[in-house]
Image: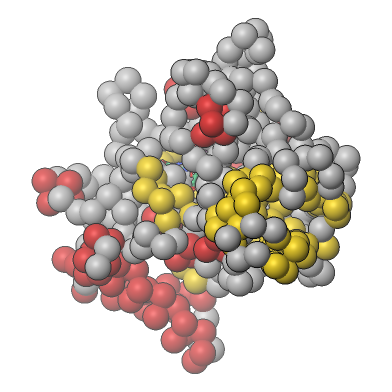
Amino acid sequence: MSDSLKNEAHYDQDRLERFVWAQQQTTGRSRRDILKQAFGLAATAASAGFLGNTASNAWAQSLPPIVKPTPADKFRTLGTNRETLFEAHKGQGYLTPASLFFIRNHTTTPRIDPAAWSLRIEGTGVTNPRSFTLDDLLAYPPVSLTRFIECAGNGRSFYATQQGANPAASGTQWRLGAIGVGNWTGVRLSTLLQAAGVKPSAVDVQPEGLDDIVSPTVGRVRRALPIQRALEDDVLVVYGLNGELLPQDHGFPARLLVPGWIGIANIKWIGRIEVSETPLFSAFNTTQYKYFGAAYPDEPVLTRQVVKSAFELPFPATLPSGLNLITGRSWSANGTIARVDVSFDDGSTWRRAVIKQGGNGTQAWAEWQIPWVARTGTHALKARATDNLGNTQPDTVPFNTQGYLFSAVVRHPVNVT
Ligand SMILES: Nc1nc2c(c(=O)[nH]1)N[C@H]1C(S)=C(S)[C@@H](COP(=O)(O)O)O[C@H]1N2
Ligand SMILES: [Mo]
């Protein structure tokens, strides 16, 4: 039995909420009723796991750092994070089930009581600072979008293992599993900003998480978003994932969704959004999430993700000789995937993969497949995607010390027996 499954009691609280959600939907009750019901249950079950917004005590410290089960056949443990094994996506359909979504926690998953929670919008950039309860958010017309959330460091390990970076880039040594595609439901951030009286002079919007401080100097997880991006129609404060409540590990009761932008833009467990007439700075846009290194003298701040591809195979994989149907997924922060080329001989020759119809949404991913008659021996598989704007994956990418945005074609080792 994996450690995470021993944490079943803690996961129960989350499932209870999902059960209520599903029940209310089948009985046709209103969204407000659904949440009223959930609040009641959360209140009576408070001793089972929920804390208020700011509660932090010895008992809380003893809770497991991650709530959902992350079994070893689906996840790789990397410190406080869980990487989805790419082979686990095979046969799972277009959307990543909440149970399979990767977790990137700078500290630990906080247990937040939704009845006590509210989201405060304040700062010099608004005329009407105010708070929104979850009920308030649910009263707005819901908006749903299917988009990926991907960590800026996804693929980081390949700077060392493929490009020979020594020392390796600092940070979590992800392969390609720090991405998932969800159908996210929430309210437009612009709707909330308008309700708070956003001023024409506002320049930055900084959502802040209710999880523990990372360190006394870094403080809480937060990152400023330019007002121009914050006001776009696709930026949401989300409370739902794939038709259910947002899971605790993924930001319950609410997180930001900033499609195409690096993972850290999608702040989880938001409790406060500061709107400012002057630029806002934190470690998350000054000492981290920027390009550092010889190739980047200007040290540009990161905004969007790039183009990547991954095989739905173990890393490394073992396959039987003969005909294999090889599957994978490719994605772009800019739009949809136009083509995927695959090599079975380390890049000497390439064939075009067939992109699955349906799916291939903007800033989500495309599923693809290609048959391969495999001969006994060791092989290097490669997949190179090109998006609808012509952006493609290079053979190598210039090194940056924190190892962000590895977009190069990845060499995938396969042993055929
Ligand atoms: N409050 C808070 N928000 C956060 C983080 C965090 O640690 N705390 N991690 C960020 C990073 S680096 C990423 S990649 C995504 C990961 O989202 P997920 O854990 O739901 O997959 O959340 C972002 N939002
Ligand atoms: Mo991230």
- Does any portion of residue 229 appear in the rendered image? no
Give whichever of 340, 273 is nearer the camera. Answer: 340
Q: Is residue 119 above or below residue 277?
A: below
Give whichever of 342, 212 is nearer the camera. Answer: 342
Q: Is residue 54 above or below residue 311?
A: above
Horizontally, residue 218 falls left or right of residue 158, namely left
Q: Quadrant of residue 220?
A: top left
**Position in image of residue 337 (x %, y %):** 81, 52
The image quadrant where one finds the C terminus is bottom right
| Residue located 62% across and 48% down the image | 378
| Residue located 52% across and 63% down the image | 88
Give whichever of 239, 76 is nearer the camera. Answer: 76
Which residue of the protein is positioned furthest toward the left in this rendering? Answer: 58
Q: How many marks?
A: 0
| Residue located 27% across and 50% down the image | 65
- Does any portion of residue 24 appear in the rendered image? yes
Horizontally, residue 56 falls left or right of residue 154, namely left
Q: Quadrant of residue 39?
A: bottom left
Give whichever of 189, 92 is nearer the camera. Answer: 92
Q: Is residue 205 above or below residue 295?
A: below
Q: Quadrant of residue 127?
A: top right
**Position in image of residue 62 (x %, y %):** 15, 50
| Residue located 81% across and 40% down the image | 348
**Position in image of residue 204 (x %, y %):** 59, 28
